Image (cartoon, rainbow, N blue to C red):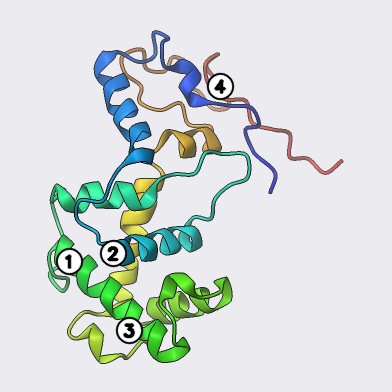
Amino acid sequence: MKLLYPGYDVLAKRDSPSWDAPTRAVIDARLALTAHQPRFLDPHQWRTVEALGARIVPPRPGRTPVPLAAMLDVKLAGRRGDGYRNARLPPLREAWTLGLAALTAEAEARHGRPFAELPAEAQDALLAAMQAGTLEHPAWGALDPALFFAQRVLHDIADAYYSHPSAWSEIGFGGPANPRGYVRLGANARDPWEAPEADRRVR
């Protein structure tokens, strides 16, 4: 996979006028999550979330892995909801607890192993069935697999991934525009501290 912004590291801006002390503190806290110890997820749930993350947003070569399980654990432990939820879903922590247990039950019923221990192809097949709403193990209960996939799995994992500096570097995002902001706002204009995109023309 070719990097769109080779060599770009948003953290090079850390001590520049682009970020102030509160911004640096928020970013440093996210970076420190690589050493996070679970506070809500148990070890099995943790491994399942790691496996989900690897299928939803596979690790990018040349980029620091995003600690998705740690980021979700912080959200769950702190009851950090989005301020809204689909009325057909249970509250955040209950939805994840039920969904992870049901996914484990599906994997063991179909393959005799937990989701995290399955090969990538089997994991993808289960996720495709979840997205289609065709998983039928009794462990799902009243939880709609398709709704859980769309509004918890995809939403929470993508939200965590793209709030991490490693993902910002991957997509050429300059991170929080605080306090300097951006100056060149016209089409195809780039501030000097923004990432230049690699030439993707066929050679």
Q: Within 10 Å of the Cα at label 2, are there few (<14), some (14-19), or many (20+) other Cα atoms?
A: some
> Is residue 137 toward the left or the right of residue 66 in the image?
left
Residue labelled with disc 3: 105
Residue 54 x %, y % = 49, 59
Mark 3 neighbour class, 10 Å CA radius: few under 14, some 14 to 19, many 20 or more: many
- Give the percent coordinates (x, y) of residue 159: 34, 49
The mark closer to the camera, 3 or 1, is: 3
Q: Amino acid at mark 4?
A: Ala
Q: Is residue 74 left or right of residue 129?
A: left
Q: Does residue 158 sit above or below 146 in this rendering?
A: above
Mark 3: amino acid:
Ala
Numbered circle sitting on residue 165: none
- SS at mark 3? helix
Q: Amino acid at mark 1?
A: Asn
Q: What residue would you read off at disc 1?
A: 86
Q: Which residue is mark 4?
A: 189
The disc, 2 or 3, on the residue closer to the chain's N-terminal end is: 3
